[in-house]
Image (tube, rainbow, N blue to C red):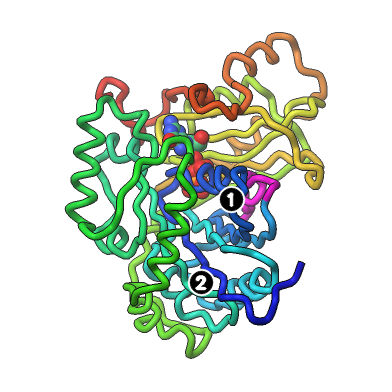
Amino acid sequence: MSRMTNAPDIPVLILSGGLGSGKTTLLNHLLLERVERLGVIINDFGAINVDAFLVNSHVDATAAISGSCLCCIEDTSELDDALTMLAAADLDAIVVEASGLAEPGPLAGLIAGSPVRGVTFGGIVQLIDAAAWHADSTLPGRENLRVASLLGITKTDRLPDAASAAELCGLITASAPNTPVVEITEGRLDASLLFDAAADQRAQPTLAAAYAESLGHGHDHEHEHEHEHEHERWSQVTVESGRGVDPERLISLLEAPPSGVYRLKGAVRVGDARARWVVQGVGGWFRFTRDRWPSSDPRTTRLVAIGVGIDTEAVEADLHAILTDATEITPDATALLERHSRRPTARPEQPSFEFETIGPAWWPDPEDD
Ligand SMILES: Nc1nc2c(ncn2[C@@H]2O[C@H](COP(=O)(O)OP(=O)(O)OP(=O)(O)O)[C@@H](O)[C@H]2O)c(=O)[nH]1
């Protein structure tokens, strides 16, 4: 349905947070709840937009921008086109899922200064991965925290105790005293908090407007990038194939990812099985869940590995080495898959299984946990 001409501007919310911090999980939760008519723009750093394939099919309207972080695109026409397309749809809100390497401030500046009619900047929800913080004590920079309208701490279930969660919350609040902080487990956020943040954002001038001003957005499409890009150190390797994967080799890759690889994600086919196997590796953990291929997808295996200082040729060879043309799955392989996976469940008390990897030095020493 197209939008009435006198309808209010659609708020555009930015969902940001480090690699694997839980953005897609939260977005899928919002889409499943179906409390609002949502449009989404999914930005992924990889050449293949794996996230676009992992976002729930209940989305009302969607656009994907791949291959770079939105915060550092020089030509904003792809973003403007996506916003123009979504602005014409009958939506309550648009969520931009930023890549895990994007900087929220400049991205907010892009949205706040966008010349597209019918949309308005609706705030930033910034996720902080408690497990990543516990592993290496790093937090997003103060500016990244302060520009957010809502801060969400994810994966507190992986912290050793409640005191660690309180310590993390205290550190965040010290950096951004005026920003509400909530815990979000397995993506379960009360959607009204998100949309209230958007409403507040519209009611008052924000840091985003200052970013828009400093970037010169709204005046022309080409702009200088003065902010430092943390992600220049990161590289990615993708594989996309009509072939399936060998379960044993896949599990071995997840258990011991190539050196420097922090994030490994995608969806794979195993033999001729009709199930889709979603692969999620973050830091020292991996998850492996079975769901269904969307009807629009011809069961294509897609994997992306992202890391620092990785030997991209070697990683590409490692990803290709798990592919196979075999259509039969042996009983042993089936048992292996079953042992490592759980069907996704709507019941919060039954989260899907997670496994700790025996990965390289990047990973926290299990003894430290
Ligand atoms: N234990 C635990 N795992 C979580 C939680 N939220 C998300 N995860 C898992 O974290 C992994 C990464 O989640 P995603 O939602 O894909 O993270 P993302 O931020 O979209 O990842 P990128 O787009 O690659 O940056 C998945 O295996 C999720 O199931 C949580 O609260 N607790």
Where residue 89 sits, quadrant-wise, is bottom right
Q: Residues within 10 Å of mark 2 (few under 14, many from 20)?
A: some
On whether residue 43 falls in the magenta region, the answer is no
Mark 2–mark 1 Cα distance, whole angstroms, equals 32 Å
The C terminus sits in image quarter: top left
Does any atom of ligand 1 lie closer than 8 Å to the CB of label 1? no
- Residue 253 occupies quadrant: top right
Q: Is residue 138 left or right of residue 70?
A: left
Q: Is residue 311 visible?
A: no
Camera sees residue 151:
yes
Quick check: 163 above or below 353? below
Check contact, mark 2 vs mark 1: CB within 8 A. Answer: no
Which residue corresponds to mark 2? 73
Is the residue 39 above or below the residue 159 in the image?
below
- On screen, residue 164 versus residue 311, left or right, reads left
| x and y, in percent, of residue 217 in the image | 45, 83
At horizontal 76% and vertical 17% (from top left) the residue drawn is: 329
Please tell me which residue lies in front, 82 or 335. 82
The residue pinned by badge 1 equals 35
Residue at image x 54%, y 84%?
A: 115
Viewer-nearest of discs 2 and 1: 1
* Amino acid at circle 2: Ile
Q: Which residues are magenta?
A: 47-58
**Residue 355 locus on image (x, y percent):** 47, 22
> Tag 2, which secondary structure?
loop
Q: Residue at left 55%, top 23%?
A: 252
Helix, strand or loop under label 1: loop
Give the amino acid at mark 1: Val
* Outermost bottom residue: 219
Q: Left or right of 334: which side holds 232?
A: left
Residue 63 vs residue 100: left or right?
right
Q: Is residue 123 above or below residue 33?
A: below
